[in-house]
Image: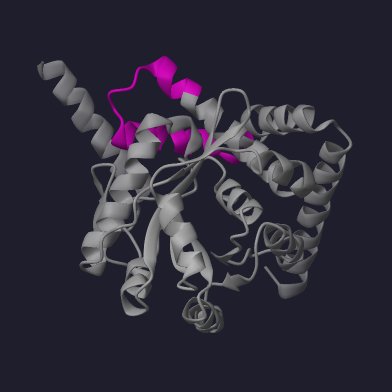
Amino acid sequence: MSKSSRQIGHRISDVMIRAFLWAMKRLPYDMRLRCAGWMMAHVAAPVTGARRRILENLDLVMPELTASERKKIARQVPDNMGRTLVEMYSDQEFSKRMARAPITGPGIDAILAAKEADRGAMLVTGHFGNYLAVRAALLSQGVAVGGLYKPMSNPFFNEHYVAAMERFGKPMFARGRRGMTEMIRHLRGGGFVGIVLDQRINNAPILDFMGKPARTALSAAEMALKFDVLLVPCYGIRQPDGTFEIRTEAPIKHSTAETMTQELNDSLEAQVRAHPGQWLWSHNRWRGAGNETSEDFVRAERRKARAAQKSR
């Protein structure tokens, strides 16, 4: 595809996204969340193949689930994605609610102590619940958390996407050499940085996640060690009534980057197993970890699971 054709495609895609967001914002807040969730679950997910990928990944790492449980999770995941997108672009209403959200766990005391000492911290989460809920809730407590993000391939969408995230804490750092340099400067100055750790990074070390090999970047732990700052797992857990619990776990004890990162994986795994409908099962988390392609790997694991069940 030529550069001009890609630009036209990006522009059309961005116009459609803007139109969707504009329509959603015409609705009362709770209604727009329900509507966005329904559209993602019943329209976008089946059309884009996201539902199929969710079911394949569930078969891979949670084969013990019943068919009805799998289908329920396959509806909950895109529903959560739709709500999260609209919450990002409903910053005033969302921030007001996050100001009232309970912040639980031992990590909050460590975070506030680090702020008082101008020490800064690395706050680590995953594509789980709504990770912006953590930043919004902490911002209401006077703790501004910058963020590391992967730029979208669509530059038109990326422009307002980054602007939306900045309303929940600045600065934002794009993945890459320049962004990393700026983030290091921010950390050295006592700033806080939020990182979403569960993306597959090519050539990253292979660690365990959900009982399967997964390439996992060590960068968060490496920076925590290098700059002697806290590494705190944090989660914005969506509640049945639409509110959130902000869960802050105890800081990861400094040891080696591999050990600390595995502890982060284990922490996220516990949340995913407790709330499987709130994690982004649609991405290829386990691909490229010395296995076959994601689809072939899943099929092989499914055959093994079925064979094991028949032998019981």
Residue 85 against residue 229 in the figure, above or below: above
Q: Main secondary structure of the magenta part?
A: helix
Residue 120 against residue 141 in the figure, above or below: below
Residue 191 against residue 124 in the figure, above or below: below
- For the residue pair 172 and 190, the one nearer the viewer reads as 190
Residue 28 vs residue 253: left or right? Answer: right
Residue 200 against residue 69 in the figure, above or below: below
What residue do we see at 52% from left, 80% from top? 189
Farthest residue in the right direction? Answer: 26
Q: Quadrant of residue 252?
A: bottom left
* Image location of residue 232, percent across then percent down: 39, 57
Q: Quadrant of the N terminus?
A: bottom right
What residue do we see at 31% from left, 74% from top? 225
* Image location of residue 61, percent across then percent down: 30, 36
- For the residue pair 223 and 101, the one nearer the viewer reads as 101
Residue 196 in sight from this viewpoint: no
* Image location of residue 50, percent across then percent down: 54, 39
Span highlighted in magenta in the image: 47-72
Q: Quadrant of the C terminus?
A: top left
* Image location of residue 197, percent across then percent down: 42, 58
Residue 11 vs residue 61: left or right? Answer: right
Residue 48 vs residue 255: left or right? Answer: right
How was the colour assigned to the protein in this rendering?
one colour
Does 228 appear in magenta?
no
